[in-house]
Amino acid sequence: MKLDSILLPGIDPKRPLVIAGPCSAETEEQVMSAAKQLSADGIKILRAGIWKPRTKPGGFEGVGSEGLAWLKKVKQETGMYVSTEVATQKHVYEALKYGIDILWIGARTTANPFAVQEIAEALQGVDIPVLVKNPVNPDLELWIGALERLSNVGLTKLGAIHRGFSSYDKKIYRNLPQWHIPIELKRRYPDLPIICDPSHIGGKRELIQPLSQQAMDLNFEGLIIETHCDPDNAWSDAAQQITPPRLKEVLDSLIIRDGKQSTEDLSALRRQIDELDDQLLELLAKRMRISCEIGTFKKEHNMTIVQTDRYDEILQKRIAEAESMGMNPEFMRVVLEAIHEESVRKQIDILNK
């Protein structure tokens, strides 16, 4: 599955494929206004939420099937393709009845294999692009499983949407990007198109541009960006939507690098990386051997495995040293904690023999 597999006639295959439009279809006037502005700027695919799964009841949950008629009118009057999210079998049947061109499965639905299977069976025999958002929590296998369920019923026009992952530890982003997860998805399925959703990752309109650039630098195929004519008064997710003129500014600012450039000039540097990786592995193996010796000593002297003061001293000292060398302290913390966890595991094995 390559980008071409989800492209519809008349869509330029160059990166980024852009899908834009309001988070929610609110009124016919609002949908048509957004569509006409976006179409005038060259956007070929309109997105709009018809059914909105909300975290708590009482919020705006979408206009329902009534809004599908508005999307059909967009197609007739602008020539744009239209897309929306489906979460149930009924949604699928309604969307197909109104000629929706592209469907996507939301993060909450992806997390439910029963719901995905229901959607897959409803789509069996239908030749339509279907995009799958990552599940709410960072679970790559669950994401892949949803794609496989669709593939197993014969769907071939599949793509993934990276919208970030929920976390209690919210700092900058609404949903943590955890870029390594879509990168691993791409490693396993090199031809699978991945589209980035900077609106949901950032949760703030000012983060859309830098996140979009990061997605392009990581060779993602496209962007799906929430775009509203009056974002501040949007009925859902107001803070993360931008106006059509701002969308044009964002897209015009992107630097699109060649993901297929020859890498001959990098070969010498990559050889150095390979050599250093070999050295790192040797050092880690040596460190683990010493950890095992320490574990044996602790067993012989009836000592506990974790010496909290010693561990805290190592952590603080090494992080400070790493920062002085220009490394990210949080990166070093993750590395040291992983090394310590493996050392503890080995020592537990020794104590329990």
Image (cartoon, rainbow, N blue to C red):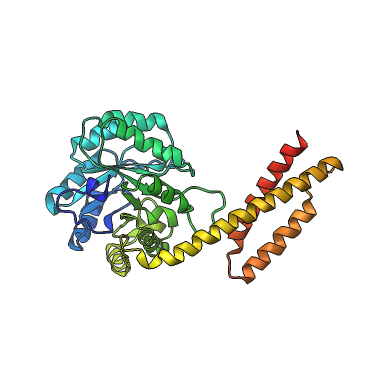
Q: Is residue 57 visible?
A: no
Q: Quadrant of the C terminus?
A: top right
Q: Is residue 191 above or below residue 34?
A: above
Q: Is residue 28 above or below residue 219?
A: above
Q: Is residue 193 visible?
A: yes
Q: Residue at x 20, y 53 (%)?
A: 32
Q: Is residue 97 left or right of residue 60?
A: left
Question: Which quarter of the picture shows residue 92?
Answer: top left
Q: Position of residue 232 (x, y in %)?
A: 37, 60
Q: Residue at x 69, y 47 (%)?
A: 343
Q: Position of residue 100 (x, y in %)?
A: 21, 42
Q: Residue at x 37, y 68 (%)?
A: 265
In the foreground, 119 or 279: 279
Question: Which quarter of the picture shows residue 104?
Answer: top left
In the foreground, 158 or 270: 270
Q: Position of residue 63 (x, y in %)?
A: 30, 42
Which residue ends up furthest to the right in the rendered image?
Answer: 301
Q: Residue at x 64, y 53 (%)?
A: 284
In the foreground, 322 or 113: 322
Q: Quadrant of the N terminus?
A: top left
Question: Which quarter of the picture shows residue 106?
Answer: top left
